[in-house]
Amino acid sequence: MLDLVSEKIQGAIKYIKGEGSITEKNIEKALRDVKLALLSADVNYKVVNEFIKRVKEKALGEKVITSVMPGQQFIKIFNDELTRILGEENKPLKIPSQIPSYLMLVGLQGVGKTTTAGKLALYLKKQEYNPLLVSIDLKRPAAQQQLETIAKEIGVDFLKIEEKDVKSAVSKIEKSVKAKGYHPIIVDTAGRLHIDDELMGELKEVKEKINPFEIMFVADSMTGADAVKSAQKFSEDIEFDSIILTKLDADSRGGAALSITYITQKPIKFVGTGEKYGKLDPFYPERLSSRILGMGDIVSLVEKAQEVIDQKEAERIAKKMAKKEFSLDDFLDNLKQVRKMGSLSDILAQMPKIPGMGKINKMAVDDKKIVHMEAILLSMTREERDNPVILNGKRRLRIAKGSGRPVSEVNQLLKQYREMKKIVKKGFFSKFTRMFDI
Ligand SMILES: Nc1nc2c(ncn2[C@@H]2O[C@H](COP(=O)(O)OP(=O)(O)OP(=O)(O)O)[C@@H](O)[C@H]2O)c(=O)[nH]1
Ligand SMILES: [Mg+2]
C-alpha cells in the first residue's frame, strides 16, 4: 500500500539532500513527483493540494538550522504533515461504563461491517469485556445467520433478532442485557449498494432508539475515492464518530487512508488487514507516516522486540557494546536473541534504513542461515571465540567439519563478525540499542 507515494517522497528527500539546500526551485522539482504519486494513489485532490502547499510553505519558511541537514529538515516536514492529515495521533475506542452501551456500525454494502463487528467483539473480549453481537438488519434473515456463525467462531454471545420493528428489537436486547450483563452491545446494520433515503431513514431510526455511545463508519479501502465520497455523505446524514478502514491488506492504492480523516474530520480508529477475526489493528497516524517515509515502523518493532528479548541478557550485551568490546561469544549471544524475535524477514522489513545497518540486515535475513552460524560458532573452542585471531586455516577446517558447513561459510562468518565489530567500535550499536531501549 502506498508504495509509489513512499518511493516518490523518499526520492524527493534524497534529491534535496543532494542539493544541499532548500530553495524554491528545487522544492518545486522535488514535490512534482510526490504530487503525481499521491493523485495516482487516489488521494483526494483537495488533500493533495493542501499537503503540497503546506510542505512547500514550511520548507521555504523554515529557518536554516545549521546543525540540521536540509534532508533531515525535509523529512521532519513530511513526517509532520503526513501525520497531520492522517489525524495526528491514535484515538482509542473508549467504552463508557454505563449499561446498556451500544456501539453501532454503519456503511455501504460489502464493505466489511459484519466481519468487523466480529473482529471488534473479539478485540473487546480479549480486553476482558463481555460483548454481545446483534444485527439490527430487520429485512434480511441471512444477515442474522452470518453474524451468528461469526459469533460462534470467536466465542462471543449472539442474540437473534426476529422482531419486525426497531422498538421491539431494542426491548428484546435490553432484556437480554439485564439478564446477562453484556457490555458493550455491538450492533451490525444493513448495507446498501448506494446511499438512499430508505437506508438513511432506517439507520436514523436505529440510532434514535439505541442512542449509541459511538457510531463507527466502516469503509472499504479498496474502493479508494468512492469510500471517501460515501464517508462524506454518511457524515452529513448520520453523523458518525469514527472510522474503520477495512481491506488494507489487499492491493489497494491507499488513497482512502490519506484522505478520509481530512475530508470528514473524523478519526480512523482501526484498520482491518485480513479476513481472519484477529486482523484488526488500532490505527496510529505517526506509525503509518514513518512507514511511508521509509523510517520503518520503529514503535511496533520495539514492542515486538521487547516481548521476546531477554532483558538482562540484552543489557549485558548493550553494556559490552557500549564499552566497544565485542567477542565472538557476544556475537553468538546476539544471534540467539535475534532468532527469538520471530520471523526475521518480518521484523527487518520494519527496520529503519540507517546507514551501516544494511550489512546487518542482509546478513541476518535468513533464519536458516542463523542456525548455520550458530553451529559454526558452537564448533569453536572457548579460546577461539575469545581470541579469533588464532583461527588459522587448520582450525577453520576443523570447525567446518565439526559444524557440517563449508570452510567458505566459516570465513564469511568471521568477515561478518569483523564488520559488526567495526560498527560497534564506531559506537553506533550502543546508540542503536539505546534507541530500542534495551
Ligand atoms: N481481505 C480482507 N477482507 C475483508 C476484510 N474485512 C472484510 N473482508 C471481507 O469482505 C467481504 C464482505 O464482508 P462483510 O462483513 O459481509 O461485509 P458487510 O459490510 O457486512 O456486507 P453487507 O452486510 O452485505 O452490507 C467478506 O468476504 C469479508 O471476508 C479485511 O480487512 N480484509
Ligand atoms: Mg453484513
Image (spheres, rainbow, N blue to C red):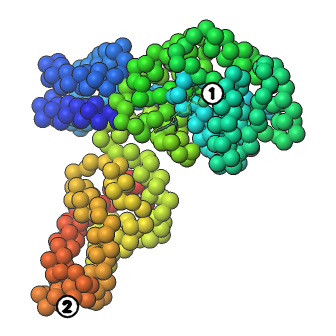
Is residue 124 visible in the rendered image? The answer is no
Q: Secondary structure at mark 2?
A: helix
Q: Amino acid at mark 1?
A: Leu
Q: Is residue 291 above or below residue 348?
A: above
Q: Amino acid at mark 2?
A: Arg
Residue 345: image location, x then y, percent: 33, 56
Q: Is residue 51 above or below residue 97?
A: above
Ligand 2 is located in which of the four quadrants? Answer: top right
Q: Residue furthest front?
A: 141
Q: Is residue 53 left or right of residue 146?
A: left
Give residue 383's quadrant in the image: bottom left
The residue that disc 1 covers is 105
Q: Is the CB–ligand 1 distance for label 1 below 8 Å?
A: no
Q: Residue at x 19, y 21 (%)?
A: 32
Q: Is the CB–ligand 1 distance for label 2 below 8 Å?
A: no
Between residues 355 and 213, which one lies in front from this camera angle?
Answer: 213
User: How crowded is the residue under tag 1: few (<14 C-alpha within 10 Å), some, or many (20+)?
Assistant: many
Q: Is residue 329 above or below residue 155?
A: below
Residue 344: image location, x then y, percent: 36, 59
The residue that disc 2 covers is 398
Q: Residue at x 22, y 55 (%)?
A: 358
Q: Is residue 108 left or right of residue 293?
A: right
Q: Secondary structure at mark 1?
A: strand
The quarter in which the N terminus is drawn is top left
Q: Residue at x 66, y 43 (%)?
A: 149
The quarter in which the C terminus is drawn is bottom left
Distance from Cα at disc 2 to Cα at disc 1:
66 Å
